Image: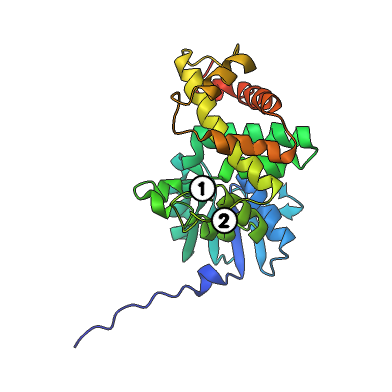
C-alpha cells in the first residue's frame, strides 16, 4: 500500500498564537530589543515570550531563562543569538516540539564588521541631525541582513530581506528604507528606482563611505585612530582608489544638509568608537 506523503503545515509559522524571542533584550540597539519592541508596537495579538537568562522581565513582559523552562505552548521561536548558540537553541526547540523557528542570526551575523561599522556611523549621523539614534543605528546594523543568503547571486540581494525583517517584527517603513540602499543596482529589480527621502540618502551614503574608510584604513596598516578628514578627502577625490565605492552615492549626503567634510568627520569618529571590535587600531 502506497504511503501518503506527510504534509507540512505553515500555519504556526505565518499565524503563530505565541512567539518566543530567544535573545530578547532590554538594551536599545540590540536585535533582540528591536524584535520585542516591534511586536509590541504592531500590537501583536498573540503571546510574546521573551527568553533571556539574565533578566526577569523584558520590556515589561515576564522573561524565562530558556525555552524549556517556559511551561508554555510555543508556536514559533525567533532565534536572535550569536551563531555558536543556535544549535543548542534548536535542540531546545525540538525538545519542546516547537514546529517552526526563524533564525535571525544567519542573516544578522553576516552583517558582522560591516554592519557594526555602519551602525555606529548612522548613530553619529542621527545625533548630528537630531533624529532617533537607535532607529538609525538599527538601519545600519541590518542593512545587508540577507547577504549571507544571496551573496552567491548578487542579483538576489535584498529579495529576502523584506521577509526576514517582517518575520522579526519590523514595519514596512523600516523595510522600505533598508531596501532603498539597493536602488540603482542590478538587484531585486531595483535598478531603475531612485531614493527620494532623506533617511534613504543617509543610509546609502553612509554604507558607501564605510567601504572607502575601510579601504583607507587597511592602506594605513589598519589604523583609524589618527585618520583625518584631509587624508580621506584625497582618497575620495582619487577615483582609482577603492573604485567600487561610488562617489556619487556618497555625495547624496548633501541632500540632507550635511557637507562632505562634516560627513567624513562623523563617519571617522563613529568607526573610531568601535575600532578594537573590528580589527582596526
Label 1 belongs to which residue?
145
Crowding around mark 2 (Cα neighbors within 10 Å: few <14, some 14 to 19, many 20+) is: many
Residue at the extreme right of the image, as rendered: 130
Q: Disc 1 on helix, strand or loop?
A: loop
Among the 4 quarters of the image, the one containing residue 27: top right
Residue 110, horizontal then vertical, whole percent: 46, 41
Residue at the extreme bottom of the image, as rendered: 1
Crowding around mark 1 (Cα neighbors within 10 Å: few <14, some 14 to 19, many 20+) is: many
Residue 41, horizontal then vertical, whole percent: 74, 59
Front-most of 272 and 60?
272
Up the image or down, 151 lies above or below 228; here it is below
User: Label 1 vs label 2: CA separation?
Assistant: 8 Å
Q: Are marks 1 and 2 in contact (CB under 8 Å)?
A: yes
For the C terminus, the image quarter is top right
* Total numbered circles: 2
256 sits left or right of 114 in the view? right
For the N terminus, the image quarter is bottom left
Question: Which residue is located at x 55 percent, y 48 percent?
Answer: 80
Up the image or down, 272 lies above or below 47; here it is above
Is residue 18 shown to the viewer in this render? yes
Residue 255, horizontal then vertical, whole percent: 70, 41
Is residue 52 shown to the viewer in this render? no
Up the image or down, 12 lies above or below 123; here it is below
Label 2 belongs to which residue?
165
Residue 155, horizontal then vertical, whole percent: 40, 53
166 sits left or right of 160 in the view? right
The circle on residue 133 is none
Amino acid at each position: 500500500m502506497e504511503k501518503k506523503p506527510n504534509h507540512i503545515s505553515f500555519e504556526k509559522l505565518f499565524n503563530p498564537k505565541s512567539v518566543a524571542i530567544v535573545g530578547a533584550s532590554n538594551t536599545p540597539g540590540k536585535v533582540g530589543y528591536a524584535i520585542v519592541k516591534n511586536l509590541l508596537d504592531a500590537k501583536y495579538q498573540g503571546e510574546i515570550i521573551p527568553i533571556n537568562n539574565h533578566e526577569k522581565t523584558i520590556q515589561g513582559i515576564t522573561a524565562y531563562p530558556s525555552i524549556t523552562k517556559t511551561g508554555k505552548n510555543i508556536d514559533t521561536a525567533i532565534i536572535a543569538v550569536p551563531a555558536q548558540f543556535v544549535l543548542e537553541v534548536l535542540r531546545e526547540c525540538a525538545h519542546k516540539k516547537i514546529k517552526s523557528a526563524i533564525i535571525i542570526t544567519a542573516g544578522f551575523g553576516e552583517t558582522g564588521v560591516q554592519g557594526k561599522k555602519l551602525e555606529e556611523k548612522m548613530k553619529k549621523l542621527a545625533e548630528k541631525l537630531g533624529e532617533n539614534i537607535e532607529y538609525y543605528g538599527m538601519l545600519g546594523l541590518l542593512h545587508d541582513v540577507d547577504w549571507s543568503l544571496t551573496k552567491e547571486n548578487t542579483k538576489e540581494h535584498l529579495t529576502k530581506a523584506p521577509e526576514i525583517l517582517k518575520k522579526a517584527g519590523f514595519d514596512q517603513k523600516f523595510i522600505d528604507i533598508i531596501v532603498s540602499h539597493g536602488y540603482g543596482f542590478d538587484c531585486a529589480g531595483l535598478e531603475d528606482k531612485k531614493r527620494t527621502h532623506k533617511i534613504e540618502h543617509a543610509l546609502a551614503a553612509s554604507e558607501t563611505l564605510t567601504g572607502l574608510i575601510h579601504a583607507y584604513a587597511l592602506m594605513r596598516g589598519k589604523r583609524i585612530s589618527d585618520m583625518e578628514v584631509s587624508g580621506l578627502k584625497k582618497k575620495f577625490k582619487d577615483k582609482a582608489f577603492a573604485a567600487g565605492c561610488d562617489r556619487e552615492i556618497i555625495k547624496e549626503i548633501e541632500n540632507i544638509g550635511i557637507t562632505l567634510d562634516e560627513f567624513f568627520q562623523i563617519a571617522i569618529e563613529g568607526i573610531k568608537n568601535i575600532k578594537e571590535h573590528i580589527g582596526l587600531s
